[in-house]
Amino acid sequence: MTGTLADLLERDRRHVWHPYAPLPAPDPPLPVRSAQGARLLLADGRELIDAMSSWWCAIHGYRHPALDGAITAQLGRMAHVMFGGLTHEPAVALAQALVELTPEGLEHVFFADSGSVAVEVAIKLCLQYQHALGAPERRRLITVRGGYHGDTFGAMSVCDPVTGMHNMFTGALAEQVFAERPPGGFGAPLDEAYAAHLAEVVGRHASEAAAVIVEPVVQGAGGMWFYSPAIVSLLRELCDRHGLLLVLDEIATGFGRTGELFACEHAGVAPDVMCVGKALTGGTITLAATLTTPAVASAVSAGPGGALMHGPTYMANPLACAAGLASIGLLRDGTWRTRGAQIERSLNDLLEPARELEAVVDVRVLGAIGVIQLARPVDVRAATGAAVERGVWLRPFRDLVYAMPPYIVTESELEQIAAAMVAAAGAAGATVRARR
Ligand SMILES: *Cc1c(COP(=O)(O)O)cnc(C)c1O
């Protein structure tokens, strides 16, 4: 590293944009020198347990020898080649592995370079499918409030219209159809009033819509919200009834995070189109994929365009595909399931004290996801400060302090994470109270 720490931060401040941040950022970021297992090693020598798994990706922890080894071995053959007219073993093997791993019926894989792009590809597939069936007017999407599907324009159009970025881009975004947010509670039985509402919205807009798109069971960046799998089953029925495709965005939920390999397995349904990303490469290199059925693929291929109209420059990057294949290899022994169940039990116990805090309105846990919801927006500076003091990296947003730790986290690391979450929620709440 060149220069001192202060110099690095100064150059960062001057030139580098961080996510959802103004320039310069109000708070300096923490410089990370390296990472190992569940831990980030900061440039100033401190060590933090990463309870975020780097935005939910690093499920096996950092510098896992199987992942790093696969990337290094692939680097010795080629870092990248274009995917138009060429192919390679890592892409074919990963596609095959994804087809085997995902629900019945998904047989074809389109590789994209990020989750947002995988969602764009899913949207194109649905519109092209309806066009091929002779219904080009069916081009709107039906979704529920509270969702998050990415930051590109098509993806943004199906994010929550209030908490998403709709206000800023009014007029520039496609106008989609929004049903109310599903009522909360993973274990809740099907809410009859909500079921009737969904059926009404889908029925009313079916003739102008191509598909329904949702995050199954867990809405992630839209609010860390858990809802009943029965609603996912209902959406499957409604789509079948009205000739709509069902798109399930498993970018956040896929690869074991919710206690099943894919969240739609809680509902026992398979989508027509599925998006995966984030943990696909175990947090090493950006890669995402859109999977679909032979029915959709053959209709689109026989349709007016004669092809799926997408093709990223770095499509199916071999290094990323090799990492993805290695990550799936690590999932195959099934320890993710026992670890996930253990993390769920521990977080349930360890987060219990948060319920006593004045500012806390809800504490919820599903699989390897733990959430403390406050009555008001979190003071992010106070909350992250309290967590860092306790050796834990958290990145709260809106009214939420949450953790999505790597599956390899130990019991004592979980205790430290939970204590930091409770302290962060306390600090955020206390700050809010003091300001009132
Ligand atoms: C993160 C996320 C995306 C976007 O993925 P990027 O790789 O950040 O573009 C889309 N959908 C869901 C559910 C996500 O959690």
Image: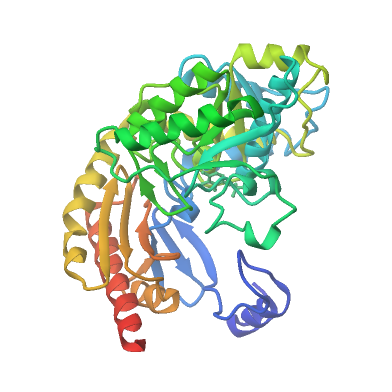
- Please identify the quarter of the rendering in which residue 390 is found: bottom left
User: Which residue is located at x 44 percent, y 53 percent?
Assistant: 53
Q: Residue at x 35, y 71 (%)?
A: 387
Q: Does residue 57 sit above or below 27 in this rendering? A: above
Q: Nearer the viewer, residue 66 or 272?
A: 272
Colour style of the rendered protein structure: rainbow
Of residue 314 and residue 210, the one placed in the foreground of this image is: 210
In the picture, which quadrant includes the C terminus?
Answer: bottom left
Horizontal side, residue 167 vs residue 378: left or right: right
Q: Position of residue 293 (x, y in %)?
A: 59, 16
> On the picture, is 162 further left or further right than 316?
left
| Image spot of residue 417 (x, y percent) | 29, 62
- Viewer-closest of 88 and 378: 378
Q: Is residue 227 above or below residue 401?
A: above
Between 231 and 353, the residue placed more toward the observer is: 231
- Quadrant hosting residue 75: top right
Residue 230 in view here: yes
Give the left or right position of residue 301, taking residue 229 as reference. Answer: right
- Quarter of the image with the N terminus is bottom right
Residue located at (74% from left, 21% from top): 131
- Residue 97, visible in the rendered structure: no
The percent coordinates of residue 137 (x first, y second) are 73, 27
Q: Residue at x 47, y 31 (%)?
A: 200
x then y, percent, for residue 344: 25, 45
Q: Is residue 102 above or below residue 390?
A: above
Left or right: 378 with respect to 57? left
| Total numbered labels | 0
